[in-house]
Image (tube, helix red, strand yellow):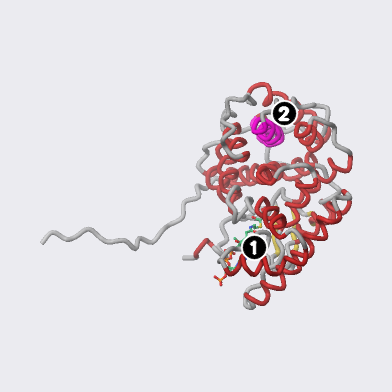
Amino acid sequence: MSDGLEDVVAAHTVLSEVDGAAGRLVMRGHSLDALAGHTSFEEMAALMLDGFVPNLPRQKQLQVALGEARKELFETIVSDAVPAALSPVEMVRAMTALIPDGEGAGVVLKLLAAPAVFTPAALRLRRGLAPVAPDPSLSQAADTLRMLTGAAPTPQQAAALDTYLVTVADHGLNASTFAARVVASTRAGLVSAVLAGISALKGPLHGGAPGPVIEMLDAIGAPADARAWLEAALDRGDRLMGFGHRIYRVRDPRADALKGAIRRLGADAGRLALAEAVEQAALAILRERKPNRTLETNVEFYTALLLEALGFTPDSFTCVFALGRTTGWLAHAHEQIAGGKLIRPQSVYVGPQPRQAA
Ligand code: CMC
């Protein structure tokens, strides 16, 4: 028995390797450094899904096919009937659930395109604005930003979003990927697998952390106030969002990939300085308070800053994470289906037994 399945190996995968001791991430044979900042969303999706989906368009054709999928989803699913009282990630999940379930390249394309269309639509609907129709001629990253604001993004903004989406495309057997693999193993279909992934991702211990990072930075306000605020949060028993990881015992390599993207974007220097001060204070305090546990910066800390700089609101950060991670969920779902085995672990019953008749 292992609480939280810690250290349990539940799959062999060709998709990614997370080396928690060295702080190293490899995806399909390439290091994160070689991918982030050098690869588009489309190239990453093609790389991750290579060999798994018969008839999936490759390279330039994938960008065209994703553009068409965005257009179809916008015309068939986006509507103001989805309750705007839901959170953005709940709206994206509700719209994704309207895609007919199944397997094959057609479903894969729709699922890869879904968060790109549904996230900007959800955010605009919640603000009482009309959703912006996709431009299928654009890359998925550029079109996502265009549908969000209504204006074409700069090449630097589109490149920064590509860097983020590639950085979070896959990460071993994290909670949402495991959830997607469990559902895929029942052969319920890829839409169901992705819905399981979104549902697991939205929790604050997984992909829901970056929104609260912004709340923390806003509440702290100035570098000089960081230590007192962080100490008070830990005294209340709160966790510091953006720190700690189940696998990494050193700094999460994705944090620096994203910090590099923030610098290249030329984002607000004051905001970055505040974040760096909060990060340093948090690391020092966590070292003092948890000397036996290495708690380092994780991906979510600089995710928050990068997505904020790109114009996403904190309540939508998990949707953008889903846009990147759908690639991983789909690749893992295919790998699981190809392996063929239903995931069905055991439990040990520790409740009462029926009373024996006297
Ligand atoms: N702030 C304060 N204390 C912490 C934190 C934190 N961020 N993370 C772990 N701890 C403490 C925890 O209280 C526990 O202390 P003790 O042993 O005294 O009870 C100890 O460190 C071990 O924690 P754990 O919950 O057993 O560790 P875990 O491997 O189950 O948790 C985690 C990993 C990511 C859920 C956790 O570090 C956390 O809650 N972090 C904050 C939320 C966050 O940033 N999540 C994003 C994760 S990265 C994105 C992804 O890949 O999903």
Q: How crowded is mark 1: few (under 14 residues within 10 Å), some or many (20 or more)?
A: many
**Where does the image place residue 14, in percent across and percent down from the top left?**
69, 52
The residue lying at 13 percent from left, 59 percent from top is 357
Image-quadrant location for residue 124: top right
The residue lying at 56 percent from left, 66 percent from top is 236
Which residue has dot 2 on it? 70
**Where does the image place residue 232, in percent across and percent down from the top left?**
62, 67
Please determine whether, in this image, residue 240 is positioned above or below residue 96: below
Please determine whether, in this image, residue 247 is positioned above or below residue 167: below
Magenta span main SS: helix
Q: Residue 240 carries which label?
A: 1
Closer-to-camera residue (60/120): 120
**Where does the image place residue 255, in percent across and percent down from the top left?**
76, 59
The residue tagged with tag 2: helix, strand or loop? helix
Closer-to-camera residue (87/47): 87
In the image, taking residue 266 as reference, residue 27 lies left or right, namely left
Closer-to-camera residue (46/82): 82
In the image, taking residue 108 as reference, residue 134 lies left or right, namely right
Q: Distance between the residues labelled 1 and 2?
A: 37 Å
Mark 1 CB near ligand 1 (8 Å cut): yes
- Whichever of labels 1 and 2 marks the residue nearer the N terminus, that label is 2
Quadrant in the picture for the C terminus:
bottom left
Asked if residue 10 can be seen in this view, the reply is: yes
In magenta segment, residue 122: yes
Please determine whether, in this image, residue 218 is positioned above or below residue 248: above
